[in-house]
């Protein structure tokens, strides 16, 4: 089990009082440390790697803001180190992929998060789409079937947008509905029936959440992914201040184990997970520990 991060990810500062602050990453790293894991350094993504999933215009306009303070929208702002943080966050999955034959599982403890960044737009606290950059790199390395599972409480509109027309990538998401960004209806299914959305009503707890995933897991099994990527947001936790689902860390451990069991045979255990949202530091420590702890379980086999 590898953990990949970069010091610069702590330096991105979207402003005083912003919920997406460096303390989140420190809290997640506390969870990793409690498991006795060492943290490795990420490499930065290159412009070519970013432009597999983002338009040249978006990448160029963000790179031009390097070293500057800049506001993209009401939620999304840059400090002097933000673009460098975003480059290392986007490269973390590539660092993980390049060691996959030796260590098949990795957790990328990075920020800014990525799943709201579309092909042409940075938004919703996200600059580059970290999980999408990794999926595109996996395609470039020859993977034919990639699953992206997103259990962040918000819908990953950016990831859905980027892979809408890509049959090699299936995207699976549960998310609170209604909630930002307003996408993720069950009938948004992608050009190749490769998008799988399930909205959850505000107040949803453990039982309904697990039942929803019991509907999605057979579709994941049917895809037979060679690589499992996870957008691990922990803002569906009951302590989270930005949403109103009522999950506990045990639910994230259960889902992580279920995903690994479902894909164990087709993926040979290959799984890279990325920190997305999660705005209660206390919940982030507990959830990261539960999620990464489940990823470390060597007893998980195909079912
Ligand atoms: Zn979120």
Image (cartoon, grey):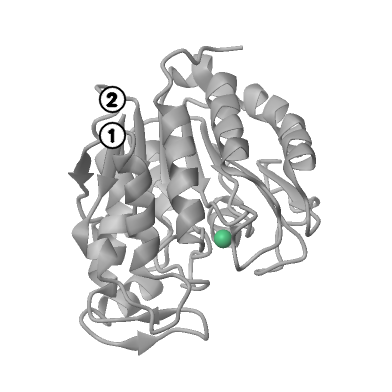
Q: Do the residues labelled 2 and 1 touch (CB within 8 Å)?
A: yes
Residue tagged by mark 1?
2
* Residue 17 in view: yes
Please rate how many residues cluster around mark 2, counting C-alpha atoms within 10 Å: few if below 14, some from 14 to 19, many from 20.
some
Disc 2 under 8 Å from ligand 1? The reply is no
Counting residues from the N terminus, which is met first, the one under dot 2 or under dot 1? 1
Q: In the image, 40: left or right of 163?
A: left
Q: In the image, 101: left or right of 280?
A: left
Q: Quadrant of residue 114?
A: bottom left
Residue 273 is situated, as x and y percent measured from the top left of the image, at: 43, 41
Vertical side of 288 occupied by 303: above or below: above
Secondary structure beneath label 2: loop
Residue tagged by mark 2?
103
Instruction: Name the residue nearer the viewer: 93 or 254.
Output: 254
Q: In which quarter of the image is residue 147?
A: top right
Residue 175 is situated, as x and y percent measured from the top left of the image, at: 68, 54
How far is mark 2 from mark 1, CA to CA?
7 Å
Q: In the image, 280: left or right of 33?
A: right
* Residue 276 in view: no
Residue 141 is situated, as x and y percent measured from the top left of the image, at: 33, 34
Quadrant containing the N terminus is top left
Quadrant assignment for ligand 1: bottom right
The residue lying at 32 percent from left, 49 percent from top is 29
């Amino acid at each position: 089990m590898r953990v990949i991060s970069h010091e610069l990810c702590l330096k991105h500062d979207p402003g005083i009082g912003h919920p997406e602050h460096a303390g989140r990453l420190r809290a997640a790293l506390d969870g990793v440390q409690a498991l006795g894991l060492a943290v490795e350094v990420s490499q930065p993504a290159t412009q070519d790697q970013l432009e597999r999933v983002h338009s040249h215009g978006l990448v160029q306009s963000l790179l031009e803001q390097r070293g500057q303070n800049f506001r993209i929208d009401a939620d999304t702002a840059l400090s002097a180190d933000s673009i460098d943080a975003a480059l290392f966050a986007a490269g973390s999955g590539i660092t993980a992929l390049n060691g996959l034959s030796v260590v098949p599982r990795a957790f990328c403890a990075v920020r800014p998060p990525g799943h709201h960044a579309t092909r042409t737009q940075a938004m919703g606290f996200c600059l580059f789409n970290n999980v999408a950059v990794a999926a595109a790199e996996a395609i470039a390395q020859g993977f034919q079937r990639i699953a992206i599972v997103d259990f962040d409480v918000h819908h990953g509109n950016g990831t859905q947008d980027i892979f809408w027309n890509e049959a090699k990538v299936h995207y699976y998401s549960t998310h609170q509905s209604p909630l930002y960004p307003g996408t993720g209806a069950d009938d948004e299914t992608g050009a190749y029936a490769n998008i799988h959305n399930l909205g959850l009503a505000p107040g949803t707890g453990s039982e309904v959440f697990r039942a929803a995933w019991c509907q999605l897991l057979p579709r994941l099994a049917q895809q037979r992914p060679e690589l499992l990527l996870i957008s691990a947001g922990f803002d569906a936790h009951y302590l989270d201040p930005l949403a109103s689902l009522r999950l506990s860390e045990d639910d994230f451990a259960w889902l992580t184990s279920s995903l690994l069991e479902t894909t164990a045979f087709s993926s040979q255990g290959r799984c890279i997970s990325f920190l997305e949202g999660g705005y209660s530091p206390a919940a982030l420590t507990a959830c990261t520990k539960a999620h990464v702890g489940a990823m470390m379980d060597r007893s998980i086999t195909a079912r």
